[in-house]
């Protein structure tokens, strides 16, 4: 079972998320939290696999909870769940170690898919949220980010670019393997090499870089 902690300061939001997640046979909501401090404490107490973190919360917000969560429960995978009012905060959260992000108005099956991806060590990038981030940037900033991203991708061989593109689409290793007709172990090896070449700490950072470069946006 995937042990999940839901952290949001709105009880109705937590109740809705719980109802969606408990409809999946492999997911168990072990605790709810009304702020980031409670989220860290609950994740530690229940040995959570995945922690859903809202950004705007009292006492300790989701962004500030990320480093504390990593220190207290290194094995827990934080997923950012947001209404997307401040895209730069979401980018900061992902670059700070979040396992992915999605919007609060996402379809129920997308939420379940994101939790499963995070629990398995994959990243989940909501296509809608990613587009929102990109659209929030000015054209000059987008062009500059795209140029820098393409420069960093220059050393990748064609197969690595294909794998990275699918990372940018939010696919798991297993899904990438099916798409490219490769074993999951081979995909994992490619991902490791891509992270090393790009100097990315995790899959989320690599996926964001792919999106900046224009990969995975079809």
Image (cartoon, rainbow, N blue to C red):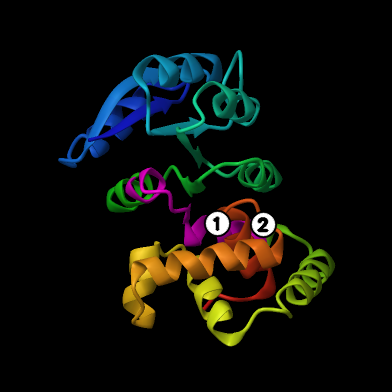
* Mark sitting on residue 203: 1
Residue 190 x/y as whole percent = 51, 70
Q: Nearer the viewer, residue 167 or 104?
A: 167
Residue 68 vs 79, above or below: the answer is above
Residue 131 x/y as whole percent = 57, 63
Residue occupied by mark 2: 200
* Mark sitting on residue 170: none
Residue at the (47%, 48%) spot, across then down: 102
Within the magenta stretch, is there residue 130?
yes
Residue 110 x/y as whole percent = 34, 53
For this orientation, the residue located farthest to the bottom is 158
Q: Nearer the viewer, residue 187 or 119?
A: 187
Q: Nearer the viewer, residue 180 or 93?
A: 180
Image quadrant where residue 203 sits: bottom right
Residue 179 vs 22, above or below: the answer is below
Left or right: 1 with respect to 14? left
* Residue 152 visible to an observer of this rendering: yes
Check the picture and name the quadrant holding the N terminus: top left
Residue at the (44%, 34%) spot, across then down: 52
Residue 32 x/y as whole percent = 36, 20
Q: Which residues are magenta?
A: 116-134
Left or right: 43 with respect to 198? left
Q: Secondary structure at mark 2?
A: loop
Magenta stretch mostly in which secondary structure? helix
């Amino acid at each position: 079972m995937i042990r999940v902690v839901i952290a949001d300061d709105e009880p109705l939001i937590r109740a809705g998320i719980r109802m969606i997640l408990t409809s999946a046979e492999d997911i168990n909501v072990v605790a709810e939290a009304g702020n980031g401090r409670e989220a860290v404490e609950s994740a530690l107490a229940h040995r959570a696999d995945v922690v859903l973190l809202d950004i705007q919360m009292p006492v300790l917000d989701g962004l500030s909870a990320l480093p504390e969560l990593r220190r207290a429960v290194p094995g827990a995978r934080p997923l950012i769940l947001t209404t997307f009012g401040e895209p730069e905060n979401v980018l900061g959260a992902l670059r700070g170690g979040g396992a992915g992000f999605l919007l609060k108005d996402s379809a129920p099956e997308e939420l379940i898919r994101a939790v499963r991806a995070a629990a398995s060590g994959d990243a989940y990038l909501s296509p809608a949220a990613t587009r929102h981030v990109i659209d929030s940037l000015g054209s000059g900033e987008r062009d500059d980010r795209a140029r820098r991203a393409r420069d960093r991708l220059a050393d990748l061989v064609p197969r690595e670019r294909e794998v990275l593109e699918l990372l940018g689409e939010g696919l798991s290793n297993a899904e990438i393997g099916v798409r490219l007709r490769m074993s999951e172990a081979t995909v994992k090896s490619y991902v490791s090499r891509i992270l090393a070449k790009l100097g990315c700490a995790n899959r989320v950072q690599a996926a964001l870089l792919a999106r900046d470069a224009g990969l995975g946006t079809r």
